[in-house]
Amino acid sequence: MRRINKDEVLPNLEERLRELMPVRETASTESVSLTSFLRRASLFRVGLSLSTIWCVNDYFYIAGSMNVENLAGDMFVNFSLLALTELPSVFIGQFLIDRFGRRWVHLCCMAITTLAFAVICLLAGDKSLGLAVIVLSVLSKFASNVGWFIMWVQCVEVFPTPLRGTGMNLCVMISTVVSMTGPFVVDLGSTDLRYPFIIFTGLGVVGIFMTSLVPETKDVPLPERNEDVDKMVKNFRYFEFRPWLREERNSGEEQIGLKRKE
């Protein structure tokens, strides 16, 4: 990298890198296979939570888009309105998680989406309120898109490095199987327009609960080993809103203690 960046090449680079490598006398020798999610409680917990969240967000995204046929007005205009929520959701999601963390922002997105679907359940039977249903559908799609973006960030930051790809692929596989039922749920709208939204609302309630169980990862180093996930889950406090401030306080107290010793 130094050569390509036209920096001075360090002499004896290999020896210097060996000196910088941390020595771990009790390094974990546990195999990092798919069965680790079943044998380790912390991995099972985060894997189950993120798999469920992925299923809910996939359902909101895929089935929500397909449900345009049950909305009032032109189907193609409705689909275009839903599609317009894609791009800004990424920038807004990044802005929010940089300032307020991942966990509670994602939970708020899930709650807004679920609440919008719950209100639609009350309005869908009245054809004169078709415009209100469309507005609420766009709002739910926008909130779920922000939640989708945060979900990706959480998966990258929660799974340990040896199992990061495996964990994400496991979530995708499970959500793909569950999302296959989406067209059948949307087709229930031909019987009663409220039925798809009732199911969406029920899934949202499950998603809200599971989202609240994912540890906060703002300003937390990426977990390199399974033990790092154990520590993350052990330090989890359900009603803590800004845990990164606790870490900053602990770090500051440690530095003060070191200065006193000196």
Image (spheres, grey):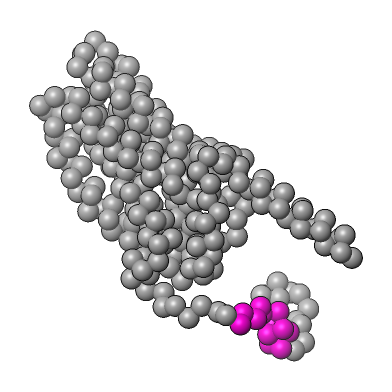
Instruction: Confirm whether residue 95 shows in the render.
Output: no
- 138 or 257, which lies in front? 257
From the top left corner, tell me how far across and down residue 24 is, in percent: 61, 79
The residue sitting at the right extreme is: 262
Q: Quadrant of residue 256?
A: bottom right
Residue 162 appears left or right of 219: left
Q: Where does residue 210 sit, x and y in percent of width and height?
A: 38, 45
Res 131 seen here: yes
Which residue lies at the image location 72% right of the left edge and 83% below the top edge?
19
Image quadrant holding the C terminus, namely bottom right
Main SS of the magenta part reads helix
Q: Left or right: 102 with respect to 195? A: right
Of residues 173 and 226, the one drawn nearer to the viewer in this rendering: 226
In the visual, does 50 lie left or right of 176? right
Quadrant of the rendering where the N terminus is positioned: bottom right
Q: Which residues are magenta?
A: 13-25
Q: Is residue 20 magenta?
A: yes
> How far across and down, in percent of the image, does residue 85 sit?
42, 34
Residue depicted at x 27% and y 56%: 174
Residue at the extreme top: 128
User: Magenta segment: does it hold 50?
Assistant: no
The residue under the point 19% across, 48% down is 180
Q: How many marks?
A: 0
Q: Nearer the viewer, residue 4 or 45?
A: 45
Please say if 95 is above or below 41. above
| Residue 237, above or below 65 | below
Q: Is residue 252 above or below residue 56?
A: below
